[in-house]
Image (cartoon, grey):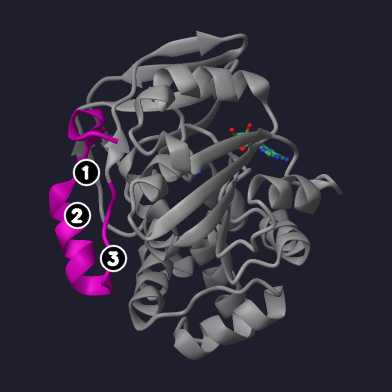
């Protein structure tokens, strides 16, 4: 991707994360509005937004992916911070479940350490929409990226992905096929993809929230030892670094359970994909 096709908002947050965790934010595609069937990418104006790990910020604009009236995701700070570690861990042959706005696919394709990217997306309308909205054809490293129209939950997932990778075992899997973080099904569905694809490392969107919830239930501190145990219990090969353990601790602290009303998970979830203002 040439520089004019990238922008890196929130450089202050990027630098702070890099210093604290050893990984930071990543460049985003330059989006334009587009429509395909019921799916749309819409630009919204200035708004105060909440981070995933850091506090509120003012964003001059953000783009949101809608299916009808339902927002699936946006390019806001929360999404950027919640993808950051998973972008950092990507290397070799990467499999991504869920194209969305191609934010993750663009960021990992841009990394020299990544050789191949196979994106599994079930909606042909999303594929067509995002090709236009994110300028997919113009990415200089488009040659690294294969977009498979397929269901990440389907029994033929391994066959389809293995063919796309020319028989190569994936190095890293990233799953993001949900509209809400911390959903109960995400760890199990990611584990099913791991069983099918056998990546060396893997993760899913909202993993840090699920880990924080597990720590609270198990009365564990969200540290590296607990992360190893959580990875073993979920059967997902989560890469554990000291910086990531610190990030998980800060994500857990950013959403303290004491401040959560009863039914806090319901309160928590909608904030992951904030509705467009
Ligand atoms: C939130 S978006 C992914 C965002 C992406 N991580 C990014 O950086 O732009 C979720 C995507 O998963 C897709 N999806 C949902 N269920 C799926 C499934 N079972 N198999 C493949 N894709 C699926 C949706 O159509 C949507 O495009």
Whether label 3 lies within 8 Å of ligand 1 gets the answer: no
Which of the pair 195/67 is nearer the observer?
195
Q: Nearer the viewer, residue 168 or 61?
A: 168
Reading the chain from its start, which is encountered first: label 1 or label 3? 3
Q: Is residue 41 left or right of residue 202?
A: left
Q: Residue furthest bottom?
A: 225
Q: Position of residue 249 (x, y in %)?
A: 39, 75
Tell me the tag on residue 190. none
Mark 2: give few (<14), some (14-19) or many (20+) Cα within 10 Å.
some
Give the labeled residue for mark 3: 23
SS for tag 1? strand
Distance (Cα) linking label 1 and label 3: 20 Å
**In this view of the protein, can residue 276 be seen by the observer?**
no
Query: How many labels, in total?
Result: 3
In magenta, the rendered stretch is 1-26
| Label 1 packing within 10 angstroms: few (<14), some (14-19), many (20+) | some
* Quadrant showing the N terminus: top left
- Name the disc covering residue 57, or none: 1
Q: Marks 3 and 2, Cα distance to the nearest angstrom? A: 11 Å
In the image, residue 228 above or below residue 97 = below
* Residue 77 magenta: no
The residue located at (61%, 61%) in the rendering is 170
Vertical placement of 164 versus 24: above or below?
above
Residue 181: x %, y % from top left: 56, 51
Point out the tag, 2 or 1, that comes first from the N-terminus: 2
């Amino acid at each position: 991707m040439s520089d004019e096709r990238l922008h890196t908002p929130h450089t202050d947050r990027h630098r702070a994360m890099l210093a604290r965790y050893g990984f930071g934010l990543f460049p985003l595609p330059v989006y334009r509005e587009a429509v395909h069937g019921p799916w749309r990418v819409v630009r919204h104006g200035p708004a105060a937004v909440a981070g995933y790990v850091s506090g509120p910020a003012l964003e001059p604009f953000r783009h949101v992916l809608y299916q009808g009236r339902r927002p699936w995701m946006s390019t806001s700070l929360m999404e950027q911070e919640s993808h950051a570690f998973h972008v950092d861990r990507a290397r070799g042959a990467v499999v991504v479940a869920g194209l969305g706005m191609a934010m993750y696919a663009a960021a990992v394709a841009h990394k020299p350490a990544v050789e191949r990217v196979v994106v599994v997306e079930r909606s042909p309308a999303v594929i067509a929409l995002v090709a236009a909205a994110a300028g997919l054809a113009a990415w200089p490293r488009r040659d690294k990226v294969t977009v498979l129209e397929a269901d990440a939950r389907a029994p033929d997932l391994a066959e389809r992905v293995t063919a796309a990778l020319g028989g190569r075992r994936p190095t890293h899997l990233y799953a993001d096929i949900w509209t809400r973080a911390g959903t109960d099904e995400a760890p199990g569905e990611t584990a099913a993809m791991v069983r099918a694809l056998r990546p060396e490392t893997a993760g899913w969107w909202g993993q840090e929230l699920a880990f924080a919830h597990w720590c609270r239930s198990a009365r564990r501190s969200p540290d590296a030892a607990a992360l190893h145990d959580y990875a073993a219990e979920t059967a997902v090969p989560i890469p554990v670094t000291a910086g990531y353990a610190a990030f998980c601790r800060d994500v857990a602290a950013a959403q303290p359970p004491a401040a959560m009303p009863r039914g806090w998970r319901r309160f928590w979830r909608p904030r992951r994909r904030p509705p467009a203002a």
